[in-house]
Image (spheres, rainbow, N blue to C red):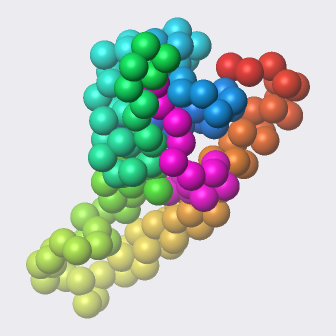
Amino acid sequence: MKISTKGRYAMRLMLDLALNNTGAPISLKDVARRQEISDKYLEQIISVLNRAGYVRSVRGAQGGYLLRKAPEEYTVGMILRLTEGSLAPVACLDEGDDVDCEKREECVTLILWKKINDAICSVVDHITLQDLVDWQREKNGDYVI
């Protein structure tokens, strides 16, 4: 499994919103500058996050974006699945897909793929955005990225 640029940038965007939360909306231009990401690309990502209800848009001259929930209510898995889709290493583990594999019943490699998938889910579903905020602050002190 390889996380795409879209998934990595969505994580950085959400982390930036969490780290720089003062109660006032944060402009995408500010995030783009701090994260050194194209504001056009961030616009595409923020629209996905907004539609999913992860962020709230505030219009106007002082407008921007805010997290809808506290950082501890978002898991890395939630954000990555929204932007990446399934995190399963093979298609036969994708939820909701009717994968018709004639070898499924006797496939021993499926056990391996399941263990890899379980390990990935165990990590991404138990690390919150607040954990990332805490790690960032430990690494840089109170310096805000």
Task: Decide: is 91 above or below 41.
Answer: below
Q: Residue at x 30, y 81 (%)?
A: 107
In-image side of 95 versus 113 (left or right) = left
In-image side of 136 versus 34 (left or right) = right
- Between 7 and 32, the residue placed more toward the observer is 32
Task: Decide: is 134 above or below 92.
Answer: above
Q: Position of residue 14 (x, y in %)?
A: 53, 37
Membership of 28 in magenta stretch: no
Q: Residue furthest bottom?
A: 105
Q: Position of residue 98 (x, y in %)?
A: 14, 77
Quadrant housing the C terminus: top right
Q: Position of residue 87 (x, y in %)?
A: 39, 57
- Between 57 and 12, the residue placed more toward the observer is 57
In-image side of 49 versus 26 (left or right) = left
Choose top left, top right, bottom left or bottom right for residue 40: top left
Q: Residue at x 31, y 41 (%)?
A: 48
Give the number of callouts: 0
Membership of 70 in magenta stretch: yes
Task: Decide: is 43 above or below 46.
Answer: above
In-image side of 78 versus 45 (left or right) = right
Residue 5 shows up from this direction: no
Choose top left, top right, bottom left or bottom right for residue 37: top left
- Between 117 and 70, the residue placed more toward the observer is 70
Q: Position of residue 125 (x, y in %)?
A: 56, 63
Q: Which residues are magenta?
A: 64-77
Task: Decide: is 58 above or below 114.
Answer: above
Q: Residue furthest front?
A: 60
Residue 136 shows up from this direction: yes
Q: Residue at x 25, y 64 (%)?
A: 91
